[in-house]
């Protein structure tokens, strides 16, 4: 049976909770739908392994994800994008390219992300061992009009996931 695909685009700082939320979303849907994750860290190990963190490279990384997501969504797959995607312009481009895309701002204050530091990257960035780290010495442009904001310092992962699913229904994607 043909189903409508859609894209849940999670944007936010490193450590805000994108990967964690994405994994939970996949668990919720995997029995009933084709669903695929586009996780920035994973894609950087493969498709984008030649790219760094300059604005040009970040945009190219995002462009590749947008291209793949578009192909999957138009074939009925739910695609969960978990990308810092720091630039408003790139996210706006994604919206023009990907059918049925909802932009979700995964929001947590920088000090909470630094405290969590799930991959130990903030420690390295603050010590100057990693350059161009979003939130430290590279910009993050907060969404001005996202479809949804989830505040991971105030909500549980399940609450954030419930809000995302409710919004997808409200938008007519589910
Ligand atoms: P990102 O993918 O945005 O870099 P991760 O999902 O890898 O972030 O890391 C987020 C960290 O925050 C994890 O260690 C996760 O367990 C923790 N965390 C605490 N509360 C939440 C929440 N409500 N939603 C998502 N993650 C949370």
Image (cartoon, helix red, strand yellow):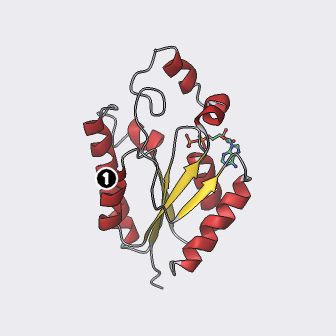
Residue found at x 45% / y 33%: 134
Residue found at x 39% / y 38%: 44
> Whole-percent x and y of residue 149?
58, 58
CB at disc 1 and ligand 1 closer than 8 Å: no
Q: Quadrant of residue 40?
A: top left
> Whole-percent x and y of residue 92?
34, 59
Left or right of residue 67, residue 143 in this image? right
Q: Quick check: 149 above or below 142?
A: below
> Whole-percent x and y of residue 155?
72, 53
- Residue sitting at the far bottom: 1
> Whole-percent x and y of residue 8?
49, 62
Residue 174 in view in this figure: no
Foreground of the two, 148 or 84: 148
Residue found at x 58% / y 72%: 167
Left or right of residue 70, residue 20 in this image? right
Secondary structure at badge 1 equals helix
What is the quadrant of the C terminus in the image? bottom right
Q: Quadrant of ligand 1?
A: top right
Foreground of the two, 108 or 160: 108
Which residue bears the numbered disc 1? 89
Left or right of residue 30, residue 157 in this image? right
Residue found at x 51% / y 81%: 172
Q: Quick check: 130 above or below 172?
A: above
């Amino acid at each position: 049976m043909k189903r409508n695909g859609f894209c849940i685009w999670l944007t936010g700082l490193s450590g805000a909770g994108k990967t964690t939320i994405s994994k939970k979303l996949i668990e919720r849907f995997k029995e009933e739908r084709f669903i695929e994750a586009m996780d920035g860290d994973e894609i950087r190990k493969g498709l984008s392994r030649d790219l760094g963190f300059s604005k040009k490279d970040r945009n190219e990384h995002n462009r590749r994800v947008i291209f793949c997501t578009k192909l999957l969504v138009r074939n009925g797959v739910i695609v969960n994008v978990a990308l810092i995607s720091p630039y408003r312009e790139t996210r706006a481009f994604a919206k023009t390219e990907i059918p049925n895309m909802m932009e979700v701002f995964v929001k947590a204050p920088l000090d909470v992300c630094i405290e969590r530091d799930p991959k130990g990257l903030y420690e390295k960035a603050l010590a100057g061992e990693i350059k161009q780290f979003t939130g430290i010495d590279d910009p993050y442009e907060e969404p001005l009009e996202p479809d949804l904001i989830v505040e991971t310092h105030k909500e549980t992962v399940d609450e954030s996931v419930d809000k995302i699913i409710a919004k997808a229904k409200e938008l007519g994607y589910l």
